[in-house]
Image (cartoon, rainbow, N blue to C red):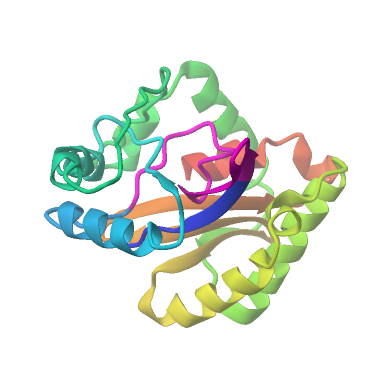
Amino acid sequence: GIIPFFIDSFGVTTGWTRIAKMVGADYTLTMINPPIRAGYGERVFLSVNKSILSECDAICWGPLAGNCPAAKEVEAHLHSFSASPHSIKRIDSDTYTLFPLPNTFDVYFKSLSKSTRGHFRRNYKRRLAGEYDVDFSVAQDCALSFSEFLEMHEMQWKKSNKLGHFGDWPRANAFHLYLFHSTFSFYLLLLYCLRVNGEAIVYRYVYRFGNKYHSFLPARVNTPQWNKLGLGQITQIL
């Protein structure tokens, strides 16, 4: 399993408290289900707790979806950790949305709403694939593609007067460059790219764990020509 954590600090009356959170826990609106292989939940949970609590005051595991196998294993083994000096508190989250994915694209596509299917047919099949040479696949030139992805992500958020992920997080650029290049040969961290006539207009940065793909960050060109097509929704469907 891989559990990406960051350490946050905040002041209290007695001083500073350090809490470890899973990456994304402080800004995402979705559940964070860590990629832990079935049957290894207890081992990962105890190992992470032992390592992190040596330098932090608390750990935040979540928010975890109730149907996530890893979440069930973590909760099942909370009691084995309760004998330690640390206290454990469960906080239930609000309602969240799940997207069930069938085994085939055709079945999945039929499950979408009529308006979403119409949007995809009109903007992708007719206006993109019908008028241009379109390719949506894993980028092969990792060095060039990742640099292009970083620049595209930054420019997209810059037009909204925001920093984006890599500008908002200290040293995030160097961290992801190292992680991407060191794992690319194992086919774990991937960049899916939508190219139109050979030009990249959308990237999706994903992590592969077994037969599941965890979407981390998107990036798209921010121009009037492409904005009206809803590129984010198109690549999410693809």
* Residue 140 makes an appearance in the image: no
Q: Name the quadrant of the N terminus.
A: bottom left
Judge whether residue 143 is colored magenta. Answer: no
- Which is more toward the observer, 37 or 217? 37
Q: Residue 91: x, y in percent?
A: 37, 25
Q: Residue 17: x, y in percent?
A: 55, 46
Start and end of the magenta stretch? 10-34
What residue appears at the point 15 percent right and 39 percent down from the top-left corner?
Answer: 79
* Residue 195 makes an appearance in the image: yes
110 on left or right of 57: left
What residue appears at the point 41 percent right and 82 percent down from the top-left corner?
Answer: 185
18 on left or right of 3: right
Q: Quadrant of residue 92?
A: top left
What residue appears at the point 31 percent right and 56 percent down from the top-left corner?
Answer: 49
Would you place residue 33 above or below residue 206 in this image?
Answer: above
- Which is more toward the observer, 115 or 71? 71
- Which is more toward the observer, 60 or 57? 57
